[in-house]
Amino acid sequence: GAGVSQSPSNKVTEKGKDVELRCDPISGHTALYWYRQSLGQGLEFLIYFQGNSAPDKSGLPSDRFSAERTGGSVSTLTIQRTQQEDSAVYLCASKRGQGETGELFFGEGSRLTVL
Amino acid sequence: DAKTTQPNSMESNEEEPVHLPCNHSTISGTDYIHWYRQLPSQGPEYVIHGLTSNVNNRMASLAIAEDRKSSTLILHRATLRDAAVYYCILRGVLSNFGNEKLTFGTGTRLTIIP
């Protein structure tokens, strides 16, 4: 597609359930990022992929959070045993490759609400 | 990452130029200055970036102080669509994978007055 695609756009779940959020980066982009943004807050870095590897996962808030990327393309962010504080917009971004001048392209985000 | 400081909010009249400041007194010689903006209910979008020289593109201009301790994003003629949160971010030259992430601060919320 033309841009970064995320699904679902909205997800409401009950506390304790697992959720999966999907990101389809721009074709050919090797770098992929996950961020989250709580209501009225700035963006919080979660994890960065280069190809299928995640050299920086320093932002994952707990072991309930995991992410994978397969085929150097689609990525899935999984949150196990969701808690109310996990409610946020989860944003995915992709970039053509490594390098300091690369522009990040963001998706529209997946809004997660944990009841 | 070196830290940036921006005003929390600014207002500007429609069709006037807007100057959004950013201080980065601890910038290193290899840090690039990036600007992104986030319109309401959307993901951030790239605006412009630079290293030492001033930069222009179709969206904005970036003026970088000679000592690089501050920069200014210039919107030449603000429209209502420019109302957004503007983020000024420093990003170092890649030495390993650890420098790939962009660390977003709280940014400047720009309000455009019709």
Image (spheres, rainbow, N blue to C red):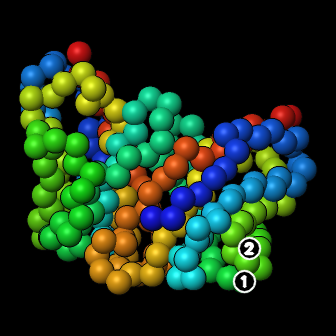
Residue A78 appears in the rendering: no
Please, is residue A40 above or below residue A42 in the view?
A: above
Please, is residue A17 above or below residue A58 in the view?
A: above
The answer to which image quadrant residue B21 occupies is: bottom right
In the rendered image, residue A88, in percent from the top left (x then y), is placed at: 34, 32
Seen from the viewer's position, the closer of residues A68 and B100 is: B100
Circle 2 residue: B64
Q: Quadrant of the C terminus of chain A?
A: top left
The type of residue carrying mark 2 is Ile
In the rendered image, residue A17, in percent from the top left (x then y), is placed at: 9, 25
Please, is residue B55 above or below residue A25 in the view?
A: below
Report whether A108 appears left or right of B97.
right
Q: Under tag 2, what secondary structure? A: strand
Circle 1 residue: B53
- Chain letter of the residue beneath label 2 in the structure image: B
The type of residue carrying mark 1 is Ser
Q: Earlier in the sequence, mark 1 or mark 2?
A: 1
Few, some or many C-alpha atoms within 10 Å of disc 2 (few <14, some 14-19, many ≥20)?
Answer: many
Please, is residue A19 above or below residue B66 in the view?
A: above
Distance from label 1 to label 2 (Cα)? 7 Å
Residue B2 appears in the rendering: yes
